[in-house]
Image: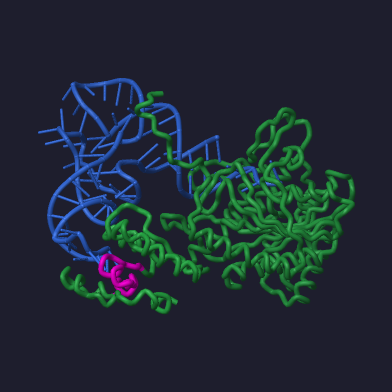
RNA sequence: GCAGCUGUAGCUCAGUUGGUUAGAGCGCUGGUUUGUGGAACCAGAUGUCGGUGGUUCGAGUCCACCCAGCUGUACCA
């Protein structure tokens, strides 16, 4: 490479991002709300490391000499290590490792960065912050119900209204039983079928029909291969899809489908039990929707998904497919994989960065930050005086700073303007010699300027600033 | 990964059927004001026209390949 022309790139790796203060303040606020709620619900705080052995968090661990795709991995001397892609798998590992000493049910929450080697999109990164709350070691569906209520309370604490999101609920036993009933045993066909069902929202009934049959062409003309099911199987699945939005009335419909299949019947019973718990909590913001499947292989029972009901846009203002902002479900066999002990468990996750993306767009949360008062530097020789002013302000915990650049007063004012400071303190020869300070209110000045037409006018207008004795400085600013 | 679209200044973009020294707005720097931001006026800087190769007397413009981004789709344990 030519040394003369080489310039390092200021680009970031695809899917990674810098996060400005505005976003971090909102994130901090959400986190503090979440912690309060978790403590109210009685969950314990836990942290696990970023890296795990790949075999501990992988989907199907055995005999692969390469970690599955979707994770960032590297090889140690002996073993593959991976950055965690969620907080559930590490939790299962943790629970297995500490099985004897943990209380059960073990209620734990965790906030942590996770990494996924997947295609990024708006509000969707390869490195992002996730929040998880889980119950380890209980088969009681009260836990599942409470998690749905919890996720709802969290979203409301983030500034969302009841009608701006909903919690969709289903049960893996419904789809599992449906596959049994239709005698779809081929593993690949099973997984294509489940994914097709899950896509109802995005591709519509017709799209699902294609995906179950020969395949589907998307908007760009790309072709997705289908499950190639029999006509009667497709028909039955489509009528299953039509039971969307279960309620008292159409429980009858799904019960018809459940006839002769115990798995579906169990699923229905579980959903009805959860409904009972919801009513005890007076919780109504949920929809039973048997078409929710969720990708995760490990779910075994109830599954939940939180979706926004408003559209989300990209930078160009185009509405985009945003997907869910949180969800979860019951995973009764995950801990068992490590220690061969029965340990039914259930949990939820919320993608905080995606939530923040949507919230910022909706202007849902307002954080305000006191910007520093800027003490302008007219000349080095006045530094002792400036230090006196600075100390007085900082002693009162007022955010303040002495201008730390090298430019003239005009640029110092521009600097203050750009940062959004409210006040600037101007002290030159006149003030210092008489122990005075001039305080300029930038916001007032800004307002005045709106009505000023020519230059000489604004130069004369000095309502935005006043000169007072140093002793009165604090009275003026507090 | 697959498909479609896009790639010109820090940002948003214009650039005629290929034709000389590649443009605008915003922003930036300086000045009108050696002690004053935000309005106004004046002046100025900035580009490997995503990359490589090709066609041509001549390419930002046409062709091929590559790269990157966007959107959809797949995957998302």
What residue do we see at 58% from left, 56% from top?
A323
Tell me the shade of chain A.
green
| Percent coordinates x, y for residue A249 in the rendering | 73, 73
Colour mode? by chain
Residue A249 lies, with reference to residue A96, above or below; the image says below
User: Could you say which is closer to the camera, residue B67 or residue A286?
Assistant: B67
User: Could you say which is closer to the camera, residue B37 or residue A343?
Assistant: B37
Q: Give the quarter of the figure containing the N terminus of chain A.
A: top left
Residue A403 lies, with reference to residue A461, above or below; the image says above
What residue do we see at 38% from left, 64% from top?
A374
| Percent coordinates x, y for residue A42 in the rendering | 77, 67
Looking at the rendering, the stretch of residues picked out in magenta corresponds to A424-447
Q: Is residue A365 visible?
A: yes
Residue A293 lies, with reference to residue B23, above or below; the image says below
Magenta stretch contains residue A474: no
| Percent coordinates x, y for residue A277 in the rendering | 79, 72
| Percent coordinates x, y for residue B47 in the rendering | 29, 37
What residue do we see at 47% from left, 58% from top?
A313
Displayed quadrant of residue A381: bottom left
User: Could you say which is closer to the camera, residue A4 or residue A117?
Assistant: A4
Magenta stretch contains residue A442: yes
Q: How many marks?
A: 0
Q: Is residue A292 visible?
A: no
Instruction: Please give left or right for residue A302 compared with residue A85 in the image.
Output: right
Displayed quadrant of residue B21: top left
User: Could you say which is closer to the camera, residue A254 or residue B69?
Assistant: B69
Tell me the shade of chain B.
blue
């Amino acid at each position: 490479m030519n040394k003369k022309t080489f310039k390092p790139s200021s680009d970031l790796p695809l899917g990674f991002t810098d996060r400005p203060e505005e976003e971090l303040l909102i994130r901090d606020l959400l986190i503090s709300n979440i912690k309060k709620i978790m403590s109210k619900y009685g969950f314990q705080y836990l942290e696990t490391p970023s890296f795990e052995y790949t075999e501990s968090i992988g989907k199907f661990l055995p005999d692969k000499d390469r970690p599955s795709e979707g994770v960032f991995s590297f090889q140690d001397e002996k073993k593959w290590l991976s950055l965690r892609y969620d907080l559930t798998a590490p939790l299962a590992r943790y629970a297995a490792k500490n099985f004897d000493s943990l209380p059960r049910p073990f209620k734990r929450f965790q906030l942590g960065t996770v990494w996924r080697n997947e295609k990024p999109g708006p509000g969707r990164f390869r490195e992002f912050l996730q929040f998880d709350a889980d119950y380890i070691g209980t088969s009681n569906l009260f836990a599942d119900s409470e998690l749905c209520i919890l996720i709802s309370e969290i979203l409301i604490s983030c500034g969302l209204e009841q009608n701006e999101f909903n919690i969709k609920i289903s049960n893996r036993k419904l789809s599992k039983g449906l596959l049994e009933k239709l005698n779809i045993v081929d593993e690949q066909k099973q997984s294509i079928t489940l994914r097709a069902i899950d896509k109802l929202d995005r591709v519509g009934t017709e799209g699902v029909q294609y995906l179950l049959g020969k395949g589907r062409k998307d908007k760009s003309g790309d072709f997705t291969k289908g499950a190639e099911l029999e006509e009667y199987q497709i028909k039955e699945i489509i009528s299953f899809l039509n039971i969307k939005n279960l309620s008292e009335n159409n429980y009858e419909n799904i019960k018809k489908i459940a006839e002769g299949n115990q798995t579906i019947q169990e699923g229905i019973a579980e959903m009805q039990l959860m409904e009972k718990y919801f009513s005890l909590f007076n919780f109504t913001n949920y929809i039973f929707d048997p078409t929710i499947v969720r990708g995760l292989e490990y779910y075994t029972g109830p599954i939940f998904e939180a979706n926004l009901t408003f559209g989300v846009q990209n930078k160009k203002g185009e509405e985009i497919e945003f997907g869910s902002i949180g969800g979860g479900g019951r995973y009764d066999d995950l801990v068992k994989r490590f220690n061969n002990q029965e340990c039914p468990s259930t949990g939820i996750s919320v993608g905080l960065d995606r939530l923040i993306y949507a919230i910022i767009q909706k202007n849902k949360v307002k954080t305000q930050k006191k910007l520093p008062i800027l003490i302008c530097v007219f000349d080095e020789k006045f530094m002792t005086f400036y230090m006196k002013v600075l100390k007085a302000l900082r002693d009162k915990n007022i955010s303040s700073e002495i201008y730390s650049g090298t430019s003239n007063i005009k640029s110092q004012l521009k600097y203050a303007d750009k940062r959004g400071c409210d006040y600037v303190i101007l002290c030159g020869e006149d003030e210092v010699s008489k122990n005075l300070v001039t305080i300029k209110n930038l916001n007032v000045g800004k307002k005045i300027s709106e009505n000023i037409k020519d230059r000489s006018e604004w130069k004369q207008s000095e309502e935005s600033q006043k000169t007072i004795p140093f002793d009165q400085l604090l009275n003026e600013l507090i």
